[in-house]
């Protein structure tokens, strides 16, 4: 079975721009979660999507949003980028909420 | 507020010996715990999990112990191998209640010396 894939792997953006990251879950997995990893804050939960609905949300501003498509693929969007948004963004999929999550390799976003 | 804590940022162990990684949590609502291993430039890899109804779970060289009263869990790796060198994250979840957010510790870097 193919693992979780994320595109792009690396991205450089300028402050004020917006960015869209993509995640394809493991085949058959219906839950997709997004995490942000920074040196200072560690791994923090952004949100979870299940069957095209946001089921759970972490403590991030509204500039961070996401969606899920009928094939379970998910995108996350960050608008009005700030320098502090520079991070590794990880996507994880699981068969159902509360089960083991499998992570993709991440997208390294650098905001200049 | 860090609800999952890994107080040892690093650990060095000789090959063949036991590695013990520790994790503490504060939220009594957590009832599902996981360990992940992470190499640089890769996403975390799931290792082993344990539900709060158990106090031990084994998978090959990896054993996770849970002490609910102390809100403490540990990962034992026996015997340790050089390929185990990585950052290990402890994670906790409210469990199979529909909430899928994992709360991660800050990680412990394990170095296994050949």
Image (cartoon, rainbow, N blue to C red):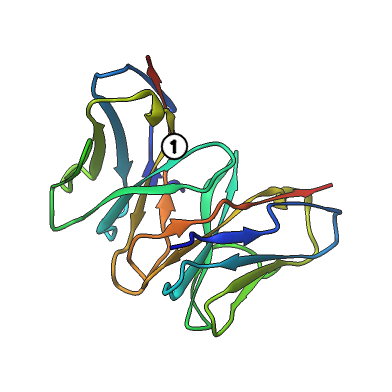
| The C terminus of chain B sits in image quarter | top left
Instruction: Return the residue nearer the eye: A68 or B7.
Output: A68
> How far across and down, in percent of the image, does residue A46 sit?
55, 63
Is residue A110 depicted above or below B112 in this figure? below
Which residue is identified by label 1? B107
> How far across and down, in percent of the image, does residue A77 sit?
70, 68
> How far across and down, in percent of the image, does residue B50 sit?
22, 52
Res. B110 image quadrant:
top left
* Residue at position x 38%, y 40% in the image: B5
Instruction: Return the residue nearer the eye: B69 or A3.
Output: A3
Residue B3 in view: no
Dot 1 alpha-carbon crowd within 10 angstroms: few under 14, some 14 to 19, many 20 or more: many
Is residue B37 depicted above or below A89 in this figure? above
The answer to whether B31 appears left or right of B42 in the picture is left
Is residue A69 depicted above or below B83 in this figure? below
Instruction: Return the residue nearer the eye: B109 or A8.
Output: A8
> How far across and down, in percent of the image, does residue B104 sit?
43, 48
């Amino acid at each position: 079975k193919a693992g979780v894939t994320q595109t792009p792997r690396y991205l450089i953006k300028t402050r004020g721009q917006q960015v869209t990251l993509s995640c394809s879950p493991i085949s058959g997995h219906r839950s997709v979660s997004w995490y942000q990893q920074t040196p200072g804050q560690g791994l923090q939960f952004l949100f979870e999507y299940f069957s095209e609905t946001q089921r759970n949300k972490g403590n991030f501003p509204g500039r961070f949003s996401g969606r899920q498509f009928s094939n379970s693929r998910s995108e996350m969007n960050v608008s009005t980028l700030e320098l502090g948004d520079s991070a590794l963004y990880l996507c994880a999929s699981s068969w159902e909420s509360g089960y083991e999550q499998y992570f993709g390799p991440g997208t390294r976003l650098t905001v200049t | 507020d860090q609800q999952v804590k890994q107080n040892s940022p690093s650990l060095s162990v000789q090959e063949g010996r036991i590695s013990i990684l520790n994790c503490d949590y504060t939220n009594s609502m957590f009832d599902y715990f996981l360990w992940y291993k992470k190499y640089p430039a890769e996403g975390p890899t799931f290792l082993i999990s344990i539900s709060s109804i158990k106090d031990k779970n084994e998978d090959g060289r990896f054993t996770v112990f849970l002490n609910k009263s102390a809100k403490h869990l540990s990962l034992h790796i026996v015997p340790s191998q050089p390929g185990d060198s990585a950052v290990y994250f402890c994670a906790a979840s409210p469990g199979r209640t529909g909430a899928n957010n994992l709360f991660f510790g800050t990680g412990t870097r394990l170095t296994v010396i050949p």
